[in-house]
Image: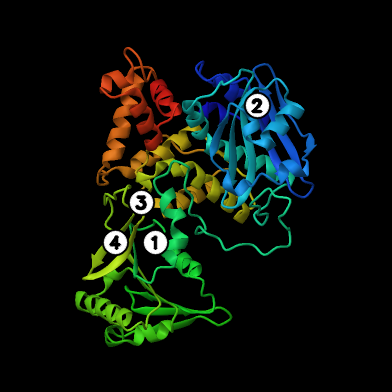
Amino acid sequence: MHEALCSTLHLDKAISACVKAAPKSFPIDGIFLNYYRDDIQSIQFLALATQNRSHLKLDVLSIPQHVLSNFIVSDNFTTVILNRLSDEPLTDFVVKTHFRKVKSAIVMRLKVDDTRLGAVVFFSYQVNAFQPQHAALVESLRGPFSLLASRALLHLGLISEENKHTRYSSHTSHHASQPKELLPPGFIAAQNSPISALLSQLPAISQSHQPIVINGEEGTGKSRLAHHIHQLFNQPDKPLAALYAETMTLFITQPDKSPKVVTISQQDAINDTLFDFAAGGTLLIENIECLPENIRIQIMKNIQIGQEQDRLSHIIITRTLPNQTLVDSDNLLSCCAFDRLFCLCISLLPLRQRKEDIPELVTHYLLKLGKKYQRRLPLLSTRFQRSLLTYGWPGNIAELIARLEKALISSHSDILDIKPGEYEQELSGAEPSILSLNEIVKRHIIDVLKHTNGKVSGEGGAAQLLKVNSNTLNSKMKKLGITKENFMQNSRE
């Protein structure tokens, strides 16, 4: 189904190919896409495909206030099963008005940052047709659907980079001030990503008066996250004093004032001068591992003394980890002693440990790069998509952005591709990545599912071979982000 979606740039033909490529165990009768237009409080249909036909469907359906006012889209970007359509009034109204034979649905709403991209609805004419494994299969298609929907909505002029929407609600004013962004720009996490829970905790983390240490490899977004936490701290009038340890340069920024650059001596770093520059705002120490040990220890002692005397408000520290460091995905927020000072520690996963986020990261950055170069939003060849998911990403998200930009500049068509073996050649000689325990377990389960042709329970199923209860295996598969697309694709290779 993944390859079928990427086989053409035409939305109607792509979803038609997706319907026809669905495995027999997936009881779908069709797919339609729509988009809520809050300018006219209506559903704008985009395309429809069934087993027999497909076409662009551009009808507009007005939504009654009593339906619209009870549905807040910002709370619902997960993939949901609706075996009782009445569980979701908006979908129920749309289906009963335009698709009366439909009895069950899976709804996947799409967004990039806070830009809505509409909804993809997989439907069946059967009652109680869908199970959790079907929703997992739909979720695995989020990346290609996001690109297809983005292209269609940009072409129709319904979205732009500045066109931000957050909720369906008759009570929402178009002129109301926008709430503060809770996630850093460009920090994208899929529904089943191990980093999702950490990102949801950022507003609470930002209010801590404990020093906050952000650990991560080069290119994982430590500095961006640190600046975002400062913004969430809710002191917009206070300065941010950022010390770059490699150069001992201090950048001081404050709203409505020109940035100030100060070169710091080792003596300035040892005494309380740093905290004077922060002036009750945030002191950010970037790449603290670059400081000489004696200076680092003295700074941490000064922080401790300042805390005891209630003179400091906010301390953030970033620390770059060596490449190929194994990060515990189950312990991304912890309390640890750093030079004998207890801190809140945030660990950012390297991209190789959060590959489920790659499709949405790609969509986000292709939208930005397309605007920068005034290019139509491209699709990715199947070869390119596979390489994104198998490559080791030693440069993390920074490398992903650079590779997408290089591909966009080099391409002269609407489909981005790479040369055969391009990524593998650039990996030669690199240190082999150390897999996390979860990644090892995930790969083993996928291999077993490939061996059983996708059979999970029953005689000869994966659960029997692995000697676990089938419910336990299904739960583990969901936690690790294993979908049918994973092992069905593997079985074809």
Q: Looking at the picture, how far across and down is residue 365, in whole percent?
A: 53, 50
Report helix, strand or loop for mark 2: helix
Q: Earlier in the sequence, mark 3 or mark 4?
A: 4
Left or right of 347 in this view: 74: right
Residue corresponding to mark 3? 349
Q: Pointers 3 and 4 in contact (CB under 8 A)?
A: no
Give 194 or 90, whichever is nearer the viewer: 90
**Separation of residues labelled 1 and 2 (CA atoms):** 41 Å
Residue 222: give its label: 1
Q: How far from the left and from the top, in percent, is residue 9?
A: 63, 33
x%, y% of residue 109?
Answer: 60, 40
Is residue 291 among what the camera can see?
A: yes
User: In front: mark 3 or mark 4?
Assistant: 4
* Mark 1 vs 2, N-terminal side: 2
Tell me the tag on residue 335: 4
Please, what is the three-letter code of the amino acid marked with disc 3?
Answer: Leu
Q: CA distance from mark 2 to mark 3?
A: 37 Å
Foreground label between 2 and 3: 3
Camera-nearest residue between 85 and 315: 85
Residue 313: quarter of image? bottom left
Task: Kindly report the distance in space between the C-alpha atoms of the residues bearing marks 3 and 4.
Answer: 17 Å
Label 2 – label 4 distance at C-alpha: 52 Å
Establish if 68 lies above or below 289.
above
Task: Return the residue nearer the eye: 89 or 346.
Answer: 89
Q: Mark 4 is on which residue type?
A: Cys
SS for callout 4: strand
